[in-house]
Amino acid sequence: MFPVQLEGQLVDVRELPQDEPGGRLSAPAAPVRSDYLFAVTHRQTGEPLGTVHLLIEDQAARRAALRLSLDEGQGEPGLGEEVLALLFRLGFAHLGLHRIAARCDPHNLPGRRLLEKGGMRLEGHLRHERQVDGSWRDDFLYAIVEDEWMGGPPPPLAD
């Protein structure tokens, strides 16, 4: 499955070749792939919108991590949700994953809204998870599992 190209109504998501700037550096080809790095572009204008990285962390457990870096300034509703939908389809329907997780800075409200609108559930608060400019930062952990994806976004949690 090389290279991967996902086409939506609003965005195109194409895998970055290894020799392209921003592409991944990898060891010689392994029999089972675990690393997918994509460029996201606007379908109509071709304008770059960001990158998405899907990293299969555990093949046996069918578990992956998703990292998004999308330009929030594009202003067109639905772009981020479409990127998530395309990546979930790739992960669950084509790669056979069971769980996809993502982390988000608690102060990144647009990022949190995107993950929640895409059907991911907030699963935890990771305190002092990473250091940025000498200060410890927290992360929120979000995830979606295969049967939630097949049934659409999960219902909101009761208070």
Image (cartoon, rainbow, N blue to C red):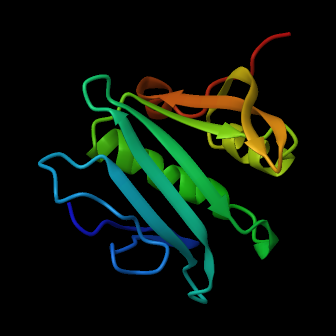
Horizontal side of 88 relative to 56 (left or right) equals right
Quadrant in the picture for residue 57:
top left
Residue at image location 54% in from the left, 80% down from the top: 43
Q: Position of residue 23 (x, y in %)?
A: 42, 71
Horizontal side of 61 relative to 103 (left or right) equals left
Q: Position of residue 48 (x, y in %)?
A: 60, 80
Residue at image location 56% in from the left, 65% down from the top: 51
Horizontal side of 127 relative to 29 (left or right) equals right
- 59 in relation to 125, above or below: below
Residue at image location 16% in from the left, 58% down from the top: 29
Depth check, front residue: 137 or 75: 137
- 77 in relation to 43, above or below: above
Depth check, front residue: 45 or 1: 1
- 48 in relation to 129, above or below: below
Quadrant in the picture for residue 155:
top right
- 58 in relation to 23, above or below: above
Total marks shown come to 0
Q: Position of residue 146 (x, y in %)?
A: 42, 29
In the rendered image, the quadrant that contains the C terminus is top right
Depth check, front residue: 100 or 29: 29
Q: Residue furthest top?
A: 159
Q: Residue furthest left?
A: 31
